[in-house]
Amino acid sequence: MRKILAIIWQALSIAYSDRNLLLIMLATPLALATIIGLAFGGTGSGDISIENIKIAIVNLDGVDENGANGQVFVDLLVPPAESAANSNANADTAATETSDDGGVVCGQTPDEDSSGRNVLFDLTDAVEMTDAAAARAAVDTGDLVAAIIIPADFSENLAYTQDDSTLDPTSIEVYGSSAALISSSVIRSITESIAYQIATGNIAIAATFDTLIERAFARPAFGLQFQSAAASFQPDFSCAFVPSFNPLRLEAQTVSGARVEFDPLVIFGASQAMFFMLFTAQGVATNVLEEQRTGTLQRLLVSPTTRLTVLIGKLLAAFINSLVQITLLFFAFSIVASLMRGEIRLIWGTHLPLVALTMIVASLSVAGLGVLLASLVRTPESAGTIGSMINMAMGVLGGAFFNVQAIPLLQPLTAFSLIYWGTDAFTKLSQGFTDIGLNLLILLVQGSVMFVAGLWLFNRRLKV
Amino acid sequence: MPETMVQARGLVKTYRRKDGSTVEAVRNIDLDIYKGEIFSLLGPNGAGKSTTISMISGLIEPTAGDAQIARYSITKQPMEAKKLLGIVPQDIALYPTLSARQNLDFFGRMYGLGGAELHKRIDEVLDFIDLKERQKDRIDTFSGGMKRRVNIGVGLLHRPQLVYMDEPTVGIDPQNRRRILDTVFRLRDEQKMTVLYTTHLMEESQELSDRVGIIDHGKIIALGTVGELVQKVGEEDRLILKVGQQKIAAEVLERLKQVEQVTSALYDPPQQAAEGADEATDGVITVFAKRGRRALPDVIQIANDASIDVLSVEVREPDLEAVFLHLTGRALRD
Ligand SMILES: Nc1ncnc2c1ncn2[C@@H]1O[C@H](COP(=O)(O)OP(=O)(O)O)[C@@H](O)[C@H]1O
Ligand SMILES: [Mg+2]
C-alpha cells in the first residue's frame, strides 16, 4: 500500500513538473468552454466583453495533398470576403481529404441558416496577411493584438503518409502584443485549441512550453511553439466550431414526453470534457512506456514490488489526473455559463454528489483505458498515435463531434464508447434525472475489464 | 567449501524474433557465486551477460532452468530473493527530471524503506557515491560519470547482500572509471557484499575478480580464478603485431609457426568501422611463444620478408585476453 502511494506520488510529481502538460490541462478547458459558450450563447449577451480582437493570420502553409492544415486557421478566423458566403464555404475549403466522411460530418446540414455564422468571426477581427514581418510590425505598433504565423511546412510536417513516415516537429508562432495581454492570451488559447484539435486528429501534441517561456523572457511579445507529429487520421474539426453544422444546437429536446430546457453547454461540453479527459488518461500509457525505455520500469520490477502494484499505482495516478482534468473542465464550463447569463448557474444540475460520483467513475474508467493502452503498444510514440485514434473513435461514437443518432449505422456502436455513457449520465443529471445507475455500472465494468486485460497483457509482454 | 550466494542451473534463454527465427542468447549456463567474492562475467558484446543478469534477477523468465539467491528460487519465491539483491543496470535507469535525492527516495520506498531509516540510508549512500553536494540537482544536469554513480547508489540503498553490476564503466572517462572500480572493492571489503560484475574489458576483470567466468555465445567457456585460467594457456607470452588494413596470406602464419619457441599464430582481420564505432580497427597477428622475446627477431624477419608493414609490436605476458583468444580463436573486443 505504501508502495502504491509512492508510485502515485512519483508519477504525479513528474507529470506536474511538466509545464507543458499543466498548460494543456489548465488552458484548454477555458478555451474550450469559451468557444463552445460563444458558439451557443451568441455574442454580445452576458458579460463577455472580449470581442473583435484585431489579429492577422499569415498562412505560409503550402497546400499539399495531405490537407491544408494552415488553411483551417484562416477559415475559422477570417470571414469570407463576400458577405453572402456562409460557413459552408469554410467547411468546403477545410474539409479536403476527408470530404467523404467529412460529408457525413458537415454536409448533412443543408439549411443555409444565417445563424450558422462562425462565432470566432465575432470574437476576432481577423485579416489574412501574406507577409510575416509586416504582421509582426503591426503588432509592435499596436495596430494588431496578435499575429498568428503558420509556417510554410506546417501541413507537410504534420502529414503522415506511407512514403513519409517521419513525424516532423512544426511550429506555429503566435506573436502577441504585450500591451494587450488578456486579448492576446485569448488568441493564444484559441490558436492552441485549434492546433490541438488538428494535432490530436493527426496525433498527440507536445507543446514545448519551455521554449515558450524562454521566448517570453527573451522578447516583450510572447511566442508559442508546438511540436506536433502526424498520423493519417485527419478529421475535419472546423465543423466543431461552426454551429450550423452542429446538430447539437437544438435548444430543447423532448424527454419522456415533456419538453425540458436543455443547455447545449452541457451535452456538447460533457462530451468534449470526456473526450479531452481521454487524452489526459493516455498520459499513463506514455508514462509507463517511457519508463520502460529509460529502464526505470525494469528497475521497479527487480525490486520486491509486484507488477500488479506497479500497475495499480499507475492506474490511480491516471485516475487522479483525469479527475483533476474533468473537474477543471466542469468548473470552466460553469464559470463561462454563469458569465454569459450574468448569474450563477449550476449547469450540471443540483445533484452535486451524483455529479461528483459520475466524475469519479468516469475518471476510473478512462484510467483503465490508459492502462490497457500502456500494455497494448510498445513505444511512447505509438501510444500517442494509437491512443489518439482510439480516443477519436470513442469521440466520434460518443457524439463529441456530431450527433451520432443521425447515423443509424453507427448507433449500435455507441455502447462501446466511454464518452457516450459519461456524456449521457452528465446530461441526465443536468436535467434533474438521477437514473444513472446503468451508466455508472457500464463505465465501471468497461474500466475494470480494460484494466484486467491491461494487467494480463503487461504480464505477458514482460515475461518475453 | 565456501557458502554459495547465487546458484544457477541450466539457464537457457531463447528469444523469438518477429520473423520467426530464434536467438539463443543464453545456452545452458550453470553458475555458482560464493558469498563475499567479486565474481566477474567477462565476454564480448552480445555474449549473453545482460540476459543472464536479467534472468537471475527475476526481470525475465528463463526459457529453462532456475537460479537461487541464498536458497530462494528467483522464479518461485521472487519477492524474498529480490529483497536480498541490489541491481546496477547497464543503462542508466533514473528519472531525469527528479533530483538525485528524489530518485534515491523513490527507489528506497520500492524496497520497503521509509521514514527516518530511509533518510539515513540516503545520506549514507550519497556519502558513499560522493554526491552529497549535488543531491538536490536534477539528474539531467549531471555528467555521465555522476549519473553512473547515482545509478550505482540506487542499487545499494537497501544494503543488499548481493549486488549485480552490469558493465558499470561503459562510456565514462578514466577518472570516473577508476572511482567505480575502487567502489567495487569497497563494497566487498567494507560492506561485505557479494558482487557479480560484468564487463567486456579484460583489464577490469583481471583487476577486480576473485573469480572469473568467461562467457561467449551464451555459454560459459571457462571459469576460475585469474591465475587458474591463465594457466590454461600455459606459460606462453603473446606477440601482438598490428598490421593495419593489409591482407595477410595464410602461408605467412604457417611460416611463423615454424619459428623456434612459437606454438601457434593467429590472424584477426581488420574490422570495418561498425555503426557507432569511430574508425576501423587494425588487423592483428598474434603469435604465441614460450619465450616471447626470444622469438621476436625471427617473427619480425618473417614479416619483413613478406613485406608486411608492421605498425606496432607488443610482447604480453599471459592474461585473460590470451585465454579468450586461446579458447575462441578471436580477440576479446567489440
Ligand atoms: N529482447 C531481445 N530480443 C531478441 N534478442 C535479444 C533480446 N535481448 C538480447 N537479445 C540478443 O541476445 C544476445 C545476448 O544479448 P545480451 O545479453 O544483451 O549480451 P551482452 O550483455 O553480453 O552484451 C544478443 O545477440 C542480443 O542481440
Ligand atoms: Mg549487456
Image (cartoon, rainbow, N blue to C red):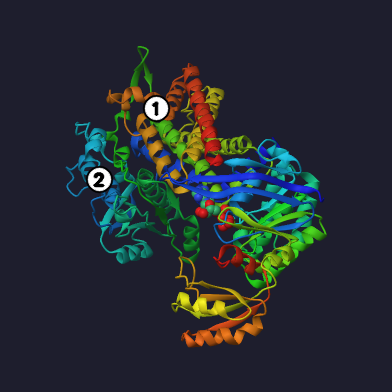
Residue beneath disc 2: A94
* Chain-order first, disc 1 or disc 2: 2
Residue beneath disc 1: A263
Residue A297: give x, y in percent of width and height. Answer: 59, 46
Q: Residues within 10 Å of mark 1 (few under 14, many from 20)?
A: many
Q: Residue drawn 77% across and 48% down?
A: B4
Q: Secondary structure at mark 1?
A: loop
Q: Residue drawn 42% across and 30% down?
A: A419
CA–CA distance in space, label 1 to label 2: 28 Å
Q: Chain of mark 1?
A: A
Q: Secondary structure at mark 2?
A: helix
Q: Nearer the viewer, mark 1 or mark 2?
A: 2
Q: Quadrant of the C terminus of chain B?
A: bottom right
Pick the front one: B4 or A358: B4
Pick the front one: B151 or B165: B165
Q: Using the image, determine if residue B190 lies above or below residue B68.
A: below
Q: Residue drawn 24% across and 44% down?
A: A97
Q: Using the image, determine if residue A326 lies above or below residue B328.
A: above
